[in-house]
Amino acid sequence: MTAEKSVPSVSVTYAQTGASTKSNELGMRAMQERAYEKRGEQYLLIKSPPASGKSRALMFIALDKLHHQDLKQAIITVPEKSIGSSFADEPLSKFGFWADWEVEPQWNLCNAPGTEGSKADSVGAFLKSEARVLVCPHATFRNAVEKFGVEAFDNRLIAVDEFHHVSANPDNKLGVQLAELIERDKVHVVAMTGSYFRGDAEAVLAPQDEAKFDSVTYTYYEQLNGYKWLKTLDIGYFFYSGSYADDILKVLDPDEKTIIHIPSVNSRESTKDKHREVEHIIDELGEWKGTDPKTGFQLVHTSDGKVLKIADLVDDSDQGQRSKVLAALKDPAQKNNRDNVDIIIALGMAKEGFDWIWCEHALTVGYRASLTEIVQIIGRATRDAEGKTRARFTNLIAEPDASEEAVTEAVNDTLKAIAASLLMEQVLAPRFEFKPKKPTNVATEGFDYGEGGYDPDACNVGFNEERGTFQIEIKGLAEPKSEEAERICREDLNEVITAFVQDKSSIERGLFDEELVPEELTQVRMGKIIKAKFPELDDEDQEAVRQHAIAALNLTQKAKEIAVGGDNEGKGNTALIDGVRKYAMDVRELDIDLIDRINPFGEAYAILAKTMSEESLKQVASIISGKRVNLTPEEARDLAKRALKFKQERGRLPSITSADAWEKRMAEGVAFLARMKAEAANG
């Protein structure tokens, strides 16, 4: 892989304020304090990045519910047994809290032997006992609810960790049971997730259930900004041709502590022999010198005389050996020892709940279908550790090859990887609060408006460092009217953006349609996605959500363009904040029409053009343009609706000879419909 093939990663620099790791007088960090303020809520959803302290936040809330809110018991359910250890005893009073967290050994069913069936009986025994806290896997909880019915859980707290494992799909048993528990309304629920995407393709809860939850959102930005050591996070994707194992050293630095996730055996990138792939990576790194008898780590001599300790979690042929390696990785005595291990190679493991604070590089081979999985993998590298100032996530993807039969699939994977990258940028950026520009607006306390301060005659951009929030004034911005639309604009813009950038025709046209009028994506496609996603909102609220979502996406993209800079060498560090402020200052009058005229995928294309070989890029473009239809009846109808709005505002219909591309496109939509009507009338 040549140097020019590397995709410039977006690079976000944080302030290292230390705030997210400092504790208050009750021993709570910033996120935990924010969650504890809402401890009285019956239904609470905590969205917060990996390693921000969700399990301890739950301990504080659960103790309050048991001691001060008259709940009988607390049941904590986790997706896999290994995560149960996050809820082990904690001497919270040592740090200022009024009680300690204690789980009697017999009631931590993650450690108990036996089948899920017999464990379900243990849940039954717990419900009848005087004990206060139970920890169990999701499977055990599902079986217990099935066996004893939802009413057996009345007056208890149900805490669901890694909540994105639940879905509203009728085949998802835990999702169905949760809906029944909420409908009965006799339990308290605390749901926790490190993902900012609700179960990817499927909603976790039905909208009417979700409306009952109060949310606590702690952003990646706040988390990383408040660290003591980690300052910069890079995200990039790289293309390779041939076998990935031959190219891996071009993105893998043996001096960085790295977790490599090799591709799933069913994926296009896999050679179908996972053991051979691991051997190949080890061969590329240096000379194999055997296995450490104590830890089971592979020992490899590099050309510069270093001995690398490599943990192989892929080889499952010898379970005893694998258990030894896992035990060595989880050995509490080694938690703060940076030299314990250098590289971990995994396939399905070392993602969720896996804690190795020294990891500096999460290197993932092959496209990952789940955004939640990508967030979890990145979370492995974003722990704060002494002396670790930089971390990165790299996605190594196979370049589409014209001769391949699966070329369309390869193109789709490339588009999906770009979508995932756009979404991660959105997750890592500060939070946006948009408000319409009005003559009556005044400065808001806590926001820094830059050198000249707040200017009543301009569109201002304020930034609140502590909460990592931008306040941006936009001319002509529609405000949400209903509570639900307000909640979506405040909490769920990432959900809307996820649906949009994963919409295949949007990303294809945004990247490869040279005749694209951006409003066809920003107004028509985004409008349609919002109508489908939030049918309960009226037209005005749907339009307000659309404008807020497109503003968040396009401002992040414009900021990234400025941050990455023209030649992009070494400029990635000017962080997104300066970029957002600079863009807003450059245009002076930030209005919604201007934002709608930005192609949301323009910057992604610029990066793609720097990474993929010209031949591959042309080929991808021709595959996509070969499928394009000029206008469908449905698109024409959407354009005609926008034309009607145009007529209400300007007193005339859009003109087909207009110099303005968007006005001309709306007129084409009207003409297309007129032709269809005429053809139908003429039979």
Image (cartoon, rainbow, N blue to C red):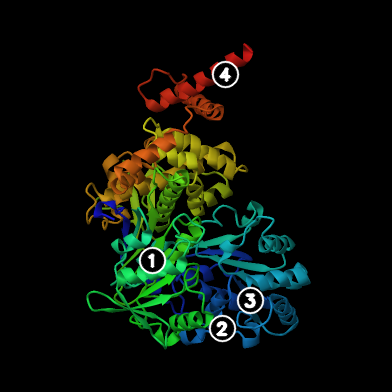
Neighbourhood count class around disc 3 (C-alpha, 10 Å): few under 14, some 14–19, many 20 upward: many
Q: Can you identify the residue that label 3 sits on?
A: 136
Camera-nearest label, 3 or 1: 1
User: Which residue type does callout 2 highlight?
Assistant: Trp
Q: Nearer the viewer, residue 610 or 424?
A: 610
Name the residue tied to disc 1. 362
Judge depth for marks 2 and 4 and give the one in front: 4
User: Please, is residue 415 above or below residue 104 in the view?
Assistant: above
Residue at the (63%, 43%) spot, across then down: 536
Residue 485 position, x and y percent, is: 55, 47
Q: Which badge, 3 or 1, is on the more N-terminal residue?
A: 3
* Element type where label 3 sits in the image: strand
Residue plotted at (53% across, 80% down): 319
Depth check, front residue: 586 or 404: 404
The disc, 3 or 4, on the residue closer to the chain's N-terminal end is 3
> What residue is at 28 percent from the left and 44 percent from the top?
585
The quarter of the picture where the C terminus appears is: top right
Instruction: Look at the numbered discs 4 and 1 and tell me whether their residues touch, using CB distance below 8 Å.
Output: no
Instruction: Compute the Cα span from label 2 to label 3.
Output: 16 Å
Query: Disc 2 designates what residue?
Result: 101
